[in-house]
Amino acid sequence: MSTDAETFDPSRSRMFPTSAESEESNSGKPEFDADRLREECGVFGIFGHPDAAAITALGLHALQHRGQEAAGIVSFDGRRFHSERRMGLVGDNFSRREVIDRLPGTTAVGHVRYSTTGETILRNVQPLFAELEGGGFAIGHNGNLTNGLALRRQLVAEGAMMQSTTDTEVILHLVARAKRNRFVDRFIEGLRQLEGAYAFVGMTNKKLLGARDPLGIRPLVLGRLDGCPVLASETCALDIIGATYVRDVENGEVLVFDEEGAHSHKPFPPLPPRPCIFEYIYFARPDSVVGGRSVYDVRKAMGAQLAVEAPAGADVIVPVPDSGVPAALGFAQASGIPYELGIIRNHYVGRTFIEPTQQIRQLGVRLKHSANRAVVNGKRIVLVDDSIVRGTTSSKIVKMMRDAGASEVHFRISSPPITHPDYYGIDTPERDKLLAATHSLEEMREFIGADSLAFLSVEGIYKAMGYEARDPVRPQFTDHCFTGEYPTGLTDQTGQQAAPRQLSLLAEAG
């Protein structure tokens, strides 16, 4: 799942909504709420459990941070598929017994969605479902296909009738057109044509399937509940249902579960995994374990490394809630400076809390954050956050601290400057809207109004992850937002297909 608009502007490398859609979208997303990175979606699936739909709803609730615009569940009861797709939060739509009762069966897949652009509409809510030659097929997708538009245009030119405007629908058509007998072979044939990042969870009338892209950019884990296999974007979804973590789905792996057991397929040549570094910095829930690493511990380590690289003379360390909390703890412990909650977050203000008139926009970040004057008044403070995107929210938070009486405000960021947009499932602005891509460090400091500003270095990120250094030939993580080194082809964005080495490897696999 990624894009959901009808028109394409190649110069901006994305699908974009019409002007009417843009107005609707902007009215629903206040300016101060848009200056954050946004993940695109979480997936969940379970096979062979009598409470499959209810468990899926719980799993999606744990993954709510990965997408808050829509949610859906598809189940199979041995005879029929059942689908419930709703706009809004999981708890608002799937907590009622009558909804779960409309999803009978022992196998279910679910999805939570955040769209990159335009208004989320019901036909784009996942899991998507189609009746294929061999029976029904439902699928949910976390990630973004960087050749999804090219494939879509080709399929439409050949007569395909698209029912949604998401890139996920492409895989349905590729599987439907595949010339193999077994469904899993048809699914793999479809995967071979994809470029970019994906974690798929799908189901047929006999199988539950999971798949990760050849580099493992987007996460997917395997667990077990009462002997039944469970697939999820993060381990926190296993925890909420009481499932046991088994392992991460490997990069390039296709897992299939049916009545005969589990089947692992590895249709791509082995490549070193390159998971998205932002899962550790920002997107994954702090209580999740990604790639064998505690996300909470990693974020603290990033904060500690930041304190080594960019110390500051201050009286108190203040996290920007909630994203900066673990890193601020690590910074405080490494620096010996006290940690205090100098900013209090209001968790009960949603995106559509109030029509964002100009007066409300001027209130800005105060709808969600309030200064704890008793902590910051008269103090030299270090604000710690995980990233700066456009910088508008950061500038408002700095001003809030000064208004609350802070004598000095130093800003520390527990990741490197974001200088390049993402095309693999993170909603980032175009490059000319990224503050670090258009401003020097001093210009950024002036823009946000801090007394000093520093970012964690790229090498510092790798040290916090337990490596001595970043491998310049085969980086251990997908870190293009900081380095500009994209690990796959970007056909839709630049017309550039997969890098020669990757093309040759994929050809060998075919």
Image: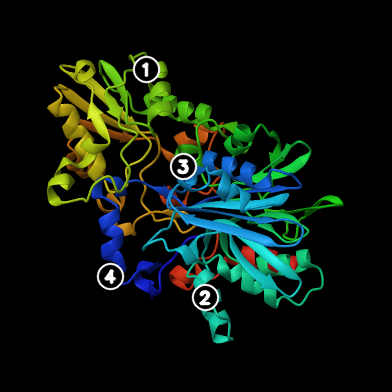
- Comes first in the chain, label 1 or label 3: 3
Q: Give the image location of residue 491, x and y in percent.
A: 50, 70
* Alpha carbon separation for disc pair 2 and 3: 30 Å
Q: Which amino acid type is shown beneath numbered disc 4? A: Ala
- Comes first in the chain, label 4 or label 1: 4
Q: Give the image location of residue 174, x and y in percent.
A: 65, 73
Which label sits on residue 149?
none
Of discs 2 and 3, which sits in the foreground?
Answer: 3
Q: Is residue 7 above or below residue 314?
A: below
* Alpha carbon separation for disc pair 4 and 1: 50 Å
Which label sits on residue 335?
1
Q: Residue at x 68, y 34 (%)?
A: 243
- Comes first in the chain, label 2 or label 1: 2
Of discs 2 and 1, which sits in the foreground?
Answer: 2
Residue to which mark 2 is pinned: 150
* Alpha carbon separation for disc pair 4 and 3: 28 Å
Q: Which amino acid type is shown beneath numbered disc 2? A: Ala
- Comes first in the chain, label 2 or label 3: 3
Q: Residue at x 35, y 69 (%)?
A: 17
